[in-house]
């Protein structure tokens, strides 16, 4: 009986907390050599039956750029040598594409486009590469490159019955996939006499068919409803889009008859009424789905008998007269960790002028929280609610998901419950700088 072989890459990732996405990598020399040999073998194998043996998750350059410099340099040099002697080696081209892209979301350099286009030619049916080609084509109106990548992506998705990739392409905001334009955004830029118009129309029609199939199977899936109707609207099928909304509205209303607190149905109805122009009704459903929205413009009630992580009493009243960010988060929450550097930047800029932060952690382990706070040098006070979403604080303020940043003005009124990223900086600047003038 043959012994089951262990995948070296997967075994390595499984030794890392959260598969390495929230921490730096320190790779022992013997493990480095093992991984180098592993990837060299995958690169040398090239393309078999139209696919490479490289791990599917290697396309996301968060992994490659966590490699120790020496390890990445050795593999890059090896891939370059392989591609020089074997110009048709798609695995080497794919690895170099990932390395060349780096970690920046700025428009890629010329050498990246050169190797990416070559990779798409060598791997015309590689889902990851075709998707990535479209993602990068979306960084400016590269309509010819975009439609080629999308045509190839469509062919592969249908072959593998993975149409869900199209949902990624249509998301307005996705924490890890930085797509700045979606297919319908491209399509709207085209004039009817553009040579690419017919090709784009054909692809859009195929994607529409994918979503229609999905909607037939999942009539209550709002993401599918929204994407399908956006495609229909782009194609000029506004009547068809409205018909889908009305049909789905009945599905959600029936769900609410069975469970008046069904959040998916509430969110769905909020989105439908917003699209249909029923703004007040949409707002009502939004607040029912996410009660935290109801605090905007209101004085936020204080929490009682609370202590911080050091056991010292803490209350919102202590911060009256300050601009306060009440930040619901957890160490296990990837998007929360992504916000911390942004919050720190705003804190460092405006703390002396009256900006404060109170963290409410939904972690279960105080030791893990303390270790993270120390390692990241987070200066503001923290409250631990180890009961998570079932705890006192989440229930009191209607928090169903994190990060949940409540930005509060000097009088205690909630300015926003969505103060993330650049919005946090903008709102704090207006609140503090505006009061000076």
Image (spheres, grey):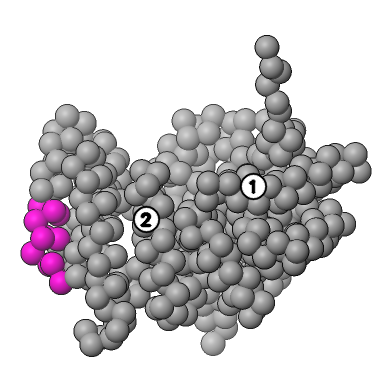
Indicate the position of residue 72 as horizontal and vertical percent values: 80, 57
The stretch drawn in magenta includes residue 99: no
The answer to which of 353 and 165 lies nearer the viewer is: 165
Q: Are marks 2 and 1 in contact (CB under 8 Å)?
A: no
Question: Residue, x 34% and y 49% (percent of image)?
Answer: 158
Q: What's the mark number on residue 207?
A: none
Local secondary structure at mark 2: helix
Q: Which residues are magenta?
A: 236-246
Q: Residue at x 76, y 42 (%)?
A: 38
Residue assigned mark 1: 54
In the image, residue 56 lies at what x, y percent? 58, 46
Q: Which mark is residue 155?
A: 2
The correct choice, above or below, for 430 with respect to 288 in the image is below
Q: Residue at x 47, y 39 (%)?
A: 394
For the N terminus, the image quarter is top right
Q: Residues within 10 Å of mark 1 (few under 14, many from 20)?
A: many
Can you give x and y, in whole percent of width and height, for residue 286 in the image? 28, 52
Tell me, yes or no, if residue 312 can be seen here.
Answer: no
Give 390 or 298, whichever is nearer the viewer.
390
Q: Residue farthest to the right?
A: 29
How far apart are the alpha carbons under marks 2 and 1?
Answer: 21 Å
Mark 2 neighbour class, 10 Å CA radius: few under 14, some 14 to 19, many 20 or more: some
In the image shown, does 377 or 204 lie closer to the viewer? 204
């Amino acid at each position: 009986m043959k012994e089951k072989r262990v995948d070296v890459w997967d075994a390595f990732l499984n030794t890392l907390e959260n598969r390495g996405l929230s921490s730096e990598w320190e790779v022992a020399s013997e493990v480095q050599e093992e991984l180098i040999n592993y990837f060299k073998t995958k690169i040398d194998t090239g393309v078999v039956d139209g696919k490479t043996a490289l791990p599917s998750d290697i396309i996301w350059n968060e992994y490659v750029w966590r490699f120790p410099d020496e390890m990445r340099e050795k593999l890059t040099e090896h891939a370059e040598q392989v591609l020089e002697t074997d110009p048709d080696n798609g695995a080497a081209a794919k690895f170099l594409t990932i390395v060349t892209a780096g970690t920046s979301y700025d428009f890629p350099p010329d050498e990246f486009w050169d190797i990416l286009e070559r990779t798409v030619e060598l791997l015309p049916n590689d889902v990851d590469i075709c998707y990535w080609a479209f993602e990068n084509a979306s960084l400016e109106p590269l309509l010819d490159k975009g439609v080629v990548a999308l045509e190839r992506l469509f062919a592969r998705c249908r072959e593998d019955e993975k149409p869900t990739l199209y949902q990624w392409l249509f998301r307005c905001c996705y924490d890890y996939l930085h797509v700045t334009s979606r297919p319908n955004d491209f399509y709207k830029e085209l004039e009817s006499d553009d040579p690419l118009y017919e090709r784009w129309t054909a692809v859009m029609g195929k994607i529409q068919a994918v979503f229609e199939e999905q909607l037939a199977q999942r009539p209550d899936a709002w993401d599918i409803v929204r994407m399908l109707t956006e495609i229909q609207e782009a194609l000029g099928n506004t009547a068809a889009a409205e018909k889908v909304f009305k049909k789905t509205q009945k599905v959600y209303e029936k769900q609410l008859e069975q469970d008046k607190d069904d959040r998916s149905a509430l969110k769905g109805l909020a989105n439908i009424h917003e699209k249909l122009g029923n703004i007040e009704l949409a707002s009502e459903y939004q607040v029912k789905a996410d009660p935290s929205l109801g605090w905007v413009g209101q004085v936020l009630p204080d929490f009682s008998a609370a202590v911080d992580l050091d056991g010292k009493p803490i209350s919102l009243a202590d911060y009256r007269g300050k601009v306060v960010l009440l930040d619901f988060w957890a160490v296990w929450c990837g998007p929360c960790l992504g916000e911390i550097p942004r919050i720190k930047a705003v804190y460092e800029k405006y703390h002396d002028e009256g900006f404060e932060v109170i963290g409410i952690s939904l972690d279960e382990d105080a030791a893990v929280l303390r270790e993270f706070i120390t390692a990241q040098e987070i200066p503001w006070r923290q409250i631990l609610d180890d009961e998570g979403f079932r705890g006192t604080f989440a229930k009191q303020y209607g928090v169903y998901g994190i990060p949940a940043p409540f930005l509060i003005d000097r009088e205690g009124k909630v300015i926003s419950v969505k103060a993330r990223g650049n919005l946090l900086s903008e709102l704090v600047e207006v609140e503090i700088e505006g009061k000076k003038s």
